[in-house]
C-alpha cells in the first residue's frame, strides 16, 4: 500500500507532541526582529516570542518559505518514500504567500511532483491545523489521498472560528486599523472579535467593550453558528498563557459537550499580527 505523507507549515500551530505522534512534516516560516531572523518554533518558541514582543520597538515581520525550500522538502520525502503521495496543507493564500510557494515547488519538480497535492485551507492557525491532524490520522489508517481530501474538506467547511484580540496595538501597527481608532479603542477597553471569511481573509465580526463581555459574546456567536449542536470538538489557541485557554474551555462546558479538546499556542507568525492576550477558538462538530 502506497503511503500518504502529510506536509504543512508552522502557522498550523499544531502542538509539538501531535506533530511527532502523527509524523507530520512541518516547514517553518521565518520571523524577523529587525535584522535578526528566527525560524518559527525552531529558533524561537512561542514563550520566547510573547515575552519579547511587548518590548520590541518595531513590529516583527514574517516571510514564507521559498519555493526552493519546499522543493527540497518534497524531494527529500520522495527519496525516502519513492511510491508515496504527498498532501501539503497551508495557511490561507489570502493571508500569506506560503501556499503559492508550495505550488511553485510542485511545478518545479515536474514529473516528480505528480503525486503532490497542495491545499489552500483558506484558514490560519489551528483553524487548519486540526484538518492536518485528521489527515495524518487517516493516512496512518491507510486511507487514500482522495478519501483524506474529501473528509478534510467537509471538516474545513463545518469549522467555526473566532479570535478575541486583547489589544488593538498590533492591528494598528500592521496597518489593519488607523492609529486614532486604536487609541480610542484602547481608551474605551474595546476588544475586537475577528474571524476569517470564505475567501480566507481576516475580518472584524464585532467590537465588544471589556474582555469578560467579549468572551461571553464569542460563546453566543458559536451557539448561533451551531444551532441544535451539543457535542463539539474544540481547540483553544492562547499566547503562551495556557490558563486563559483552559478558562475559556471551562466556559464552553456550560454550553456544549466537549469531545476532542486541544490546547495550543498561537504561534509567533500569527501572533505578530494580533499580539499578546489573544484567544483563538476553533470548533468543529463531533
Image: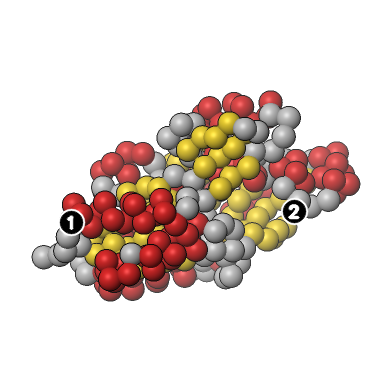
Q: With respect to residue 139, does 21 lie above or below?
A: above
Q: Residue at x 65, y 55 (%)?
A: 194
Residue at 28% of width from left, 71% of height from top? 111
From the image, tell me which residue sits under label 2.
176
Position of residue 215 relative to residue 203, above or below, is above
- Residue 225: image location, x then y, percent: 56, 66
Q: Is residue 128 visible?
A: no
Measured from the top left, where is residue 165 in percent x and y? 67, 45
Q: Which secondary structure, mark 2? A: loop
Q: Which of the pair 115/165 is nearer the observer?
A: 115
> Sequence order check: which comes first, mark 2 or mark 1?
1
The residue at 68%/61% (across/down) is 203
Q: Say which element carries label 1.
A: loop
Q: Which mark is residue 81?
A: 1
Viewer-nearest residue: 13 or 164: 13
Q: Percent position (x, y) of residue 83?
A: 16, 64
User: Mark 1 packing: few (<14 Cα in 10 Å), some, or many (20+)?
Assistant: some
The crowd level at tag 2 (other Cα within 10 Å; few <14, some 14-19, many 20+) is: few
In this view, 172 is above or below 47: below
Q: Are discs 2 and 1 less than 8 Å apart at CB?
A: no
Label 2 and label 1: CA atoms lie apart by: 44 Å
Amino acid at each position: 500500500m502506497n503511503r500518504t505523507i502529510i506536509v504543512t507549515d508552522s502557522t498550523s500551530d499544531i502542538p509539538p507532541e501531535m506533530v511527532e505522534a502523527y509524523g507530520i512534516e512541518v516547514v517553518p516560516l521565518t520571523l524577523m526582529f529587525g535584522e535578526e531572523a528566527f525560524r518559527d518554533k525552531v529558533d524561537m518558541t512561542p514563550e520566547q516570542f510573547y515575552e519579547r514582543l511587548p518590548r520590541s520597538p518595531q513590529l516583527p515581520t514574517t516571510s514564507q518559505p521559498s519555493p526552493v525550500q519546499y522543493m527540497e522538502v518534497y524531494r527529500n520525502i520522495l527519496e525516502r518514500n519513492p511510491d508515496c503521495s504527498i498532501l501539503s496543507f497551508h495557511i490561507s493564500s489570502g493571508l500569506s504567500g506560503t501556499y503559492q510557494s508550495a505550488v511553485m515547488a510542485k511545478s518545479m519538480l515536474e514529473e516528480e511532483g505528480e503525486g503532490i497535492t497542495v491545499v489552500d485551507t483558506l484558514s490560519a492557525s489551528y483553524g487548519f491545523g486540526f484538518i492536518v491532524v485528521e489527515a495524518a490520522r487517516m493516512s496512518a489508517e491507510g486511507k487514500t489521498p482522495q478519501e483524506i481530501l474529501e473528509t478534510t474538506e467537509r471538516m474545513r467547511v463545518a469549522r467555526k472560528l473566532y479570535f478575541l484580540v486583547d489589544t488593538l496595538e498590533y492591528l494598528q501597527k500592521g496597518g489593519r486599523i488607523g492609529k486614532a481608532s486604536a487609541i480610542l479603542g484602547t481608551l474605551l477597553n474595546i476588544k475586537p472579535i475577528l474571524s476569517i471569511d470564505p475567501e480566507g481573509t481576516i475580518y472584524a465580526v464585532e467590537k465588544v467593550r471589556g474582555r469578560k463581555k467579549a468572551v461571553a459574546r464569542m460563546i453566543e456567536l458559536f451557539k448561533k453558528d451551531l444551532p441544535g449542536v451539543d457535542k463539539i470538538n474544540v481547540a483553544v489557541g492562547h499566547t503562551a498563557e495556557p490558563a486563559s485557554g483552559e478558562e475559556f474551555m471551562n466556559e464552553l462546558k456550560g454550553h456544549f459537550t466537549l469531545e476532542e479538546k486541544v490546547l495550543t499556542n498561537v504561534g509567533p507568525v500569527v501572533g505578530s499580527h494580533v499580539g499578546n492576550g489573544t484567544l483563538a477558538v476553533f470548533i468543529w462538530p463531533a
